[in-house]
Amino acid sequence: MTTLADRLTQSVDWAVIAPPVITAVTAVVVLVADLFLPAARKRLLGPIALAGLALAALALVPLRHGDRVTFCLADGPGACSYAADRFAVLVQLLVLGGALLTALLSLQETDPRSGDSALPGGEYWFLLLSSVTGAALLPASRDLATLIIALEVTTLPAYALVALRKGGDGPEAALKFFLTSVAATAVTLLGVSFVYAASGSLHLGEIASGLSAADPRLATLAEAGVALTLVGFAFKTAAVPFHFWVPETYLGAPLPVAAYLSVVGKTAGLAGLVVLTARGFPDHGHLWGPVLAALAGLTMTVGNAAALRATEDAPGGAVRLLAWSSVGQAGYLLVPIAAGAYVGADEAMGTLLAYALMYAAANLGAFAVVAYAGRRSPGQRLADYRGLWARQPLAALALGFFLLCLAGLPPGVIGLFAKVAVLRTAVDAGLGVLAVVMAVNVAVALYYYLRWTALLFRPAPPAAAAEAPADGPGDAARPGRSLAGAIGLAAAAALAFSGAPQLILGFTTDAFL
Amino acid sequence: MTSRELLSPSGQDVVFVLVGLVVLGAAVLCVTTRQLVHAALWLVVALGGLAVQYLLLTAEFVAWVQVLIYLGSVVVLLLFGLMLTKAPIGPSPDADSGNRPVALAVALAAAALLVTLVIDAFRTAWIDLDTPHGTAEQVGDSLFRTWVLPFEALSVLLLAALIGAIVVSRVRSRAGGDR
Amino acid sequence: MHLVYPAVLAVLLFCVGLYGVLARRNAVLVLMSVELMLAAVSLNLVAFDVWLRDATHAGQVFTLFLIALSAAEIGIGLAIVLLVHRARGTVAIDELRALREPRAPQRETE
């Protein structure tokens, strides 16, 4: 029998949990370094954060076989709290890559030489890195406590990050984001308590077996619990009707934070949804399949319909359009999760991964170009992008490519293939109506993506060239470099995916469970 | 197990129901009163009543943590929040929005659905309160044998909340001059 | 004790909090209502844990985590509410309209 000294705490395999731990440690290091660095050297905080994220991404390499677990129960090796399986490792790669790109975007905003408008460096990096820690922990969680807490660790620093830009609309945006998010958490938790009552455990594997062996009198309670948990989770990832905070938050937040929320925040939330449905509630597909399918259809329709109304002269129109486009894309991302009820979790996870990787590269790239162009025209009107090809040809080309990827047209070939993969999964699952709705939405979305792309290549109005403010001798060069680097990386990723689609489409036929 | 009936309650059941009525009454007053500071104080009564319920359910560690953290810090924070946003001492005109009828309908519908669901599911479920199940030793043992990962993740959450709250509410004077 | 007592109390408390979230206008009052909802869920979890005699005390441990989570959210929530009050002079959530969609193309948002 185990003695008292033996097994006092859980055993930890540090190599397995390295990615979130390295990110968390970097967060604290940056915060403490902010205290000790003299003002002249505060610029080093950004590179320290970047190095930490790169190191965390490298720590994923030993885990690529996807068979390591840690934080297991002492008396039952089956129930572990953290499992670095292939799906989790790939989502963590997406999260860390997205965070790296966001960090590159943020270097300009936190540069202390921008004076008053700079964001506070140490705290910004700390909050961003703690959010990334939660997002990295989320796909590998295998019990409900870790899952919910990881979701909160992802979103709570985001509330503060959105509010960092104090002038303007940051505070209001943060308040609305906060209130809707907290209400969604409360609904999720009610569902979790019902699932706990019906299954007797909070570990996902034991929940799955506990629900199927449950007392028949608790069956309705179990179904209510499953529905509430998933619906609350979907609300936190901006599914209808909790989508309305998205454009206001993205407008009020600093642009890198909006980019981060649109890609990493959404993907982490959706990965959590997949983990819940595939590992916790696999036998209840008849319940969550239709519910998630309905949410997917509604979300993509609402997002695309609202994006259609974007006008050229409205201030902040570019960011608003990207925000509604991201709501529509979230609808597309929900489709494979819903399909997982009928075709099995492997195909659902694979298709979700493929689409999410394409979406991450294209969306982050689009935000990077918007940040780059925003240095000259901070109003972010769509009209400011007219004739960008004449002023900054590479940026215009990159933005055009990213928009076409999101729309699903050549030369954004990977966007097209990813959408076809999602449609095929929906059809295989028998969700014919949803596939039709998605196809209609993709066609409708072409309008606003193509309109913006066309604007880039129109001749610029003559007044615009004279109005462009002259940059100071030094301040354009360095911030421009990090933004250009971000655009370049995102473009390289999207081009690589387009040139060799099997890189990510191969996931659709892989086995993950 | 001796057969027990719903209508022959033990002493614990009676106290539970009485305290439950107090908790519900305080909660209803908290969400309907127009005086903001009274709402905070009714919240204290509701949460304190819940701590008593935890004691009745033999979950003593959770009960004391509830008193310490919810009553000790959360309500104090809410009172500070009310003070710093200049809440009026008497009735406040902006306490309720125009959505009240819709909100009431939604809440009543949800209550009807959930209460039916819960009563139907737990018709024959009895809690055994004879042996305490929630002493500090038991909970601490579980926490460090089974729940270490969420516990550590929670520490990141708390630090992020602390730093976030400070950086959001700090008054920024001049560039570089605000530490 | 019959499990119905704590379960029904928790559900009723949750619905009272739900009413508060939907009906209240002052952001601090909405926060109080969310606290009621979270407290209701905690009661559920503790009652189920004692009913199941869970060896890992999952329900009670999760309740401790929820209490810490509520404290963290209240902290950051109130900081944001204070920020909004400083910026706009009000914390009534239906008066915060600056970021709404522009109704007509020529009218600028405030």
Image (cartoon, rainbow, N blue to C red):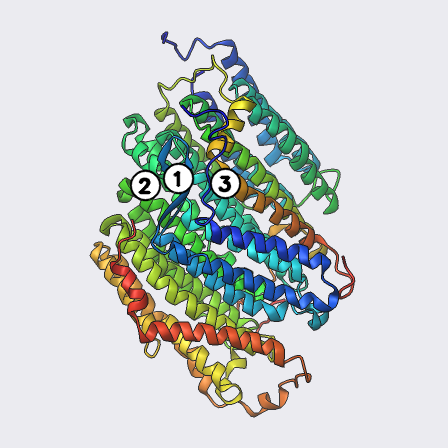
Residue B122 at x, y = what percent? 37, 23
Apparent side of residue A209 relative to residue A250 in the rendered image (left or right): left
Residues under labels 3 and 1: Cα distance? 12 Å
For the residues beneath circles 1 and 2, the answer to whether they share a chain is yes
- What is the chain letter for disc 3? B
Q: Residue at x 50, y 84 (%)?
A: A386
Whether residue C81 is visible:
no
Check residue A53 in the rendering and tell me which mark sits there, or answer none: none
Q: Is residue A177 above or below residue B149?
A: below
For disc 2, the neighbor class at 10 Å (few under 14, some 14 to 19, many from 20) is many
Asked if labels 1 and 3 touch by Cβ distance under 8 angstroms, the answer is no
Q: Amino acid at mark 1?
A: Cys
For disc 1, the neighbor class at 10 Å (few under 14, some 14 to 19, many from 20) is many
Q: Nearer the viewer, residue A41 or B58?
A: A41
Check residue B150 in the rendering and tell me which mark sits there, or answer none: 3
Residue A307 falls in image quadrant: bottom left
Apparent side of residue A53 relative to residue B126 in the rendered image (left or right): right
Return the disc, 1 or 2, that comes first in the chain's sequence: 1
Check residue A281 in the rendering and tell me which mark sits there, or answer none: 2
Check residue A80 in the rendering and tell me which mark sits there, or answer none: 1
- What is the chain letter for disc 1? A
Q: Residue at x 52, y 60 (%)?
A: A53
Residue A62 at x, y = what percent? 40, 56
- What is the chain letter for disc 2? A
Residue A76 falls in image quadrant: top left
Q: Tell me the mark number nearer the camera, choosing from 2 and 3.
A: 3
Q: Amino acid at mark 3?
A: Pro
Q: Tell me the mark number nearer the camera, choosing from 3 and 1.
A: 1
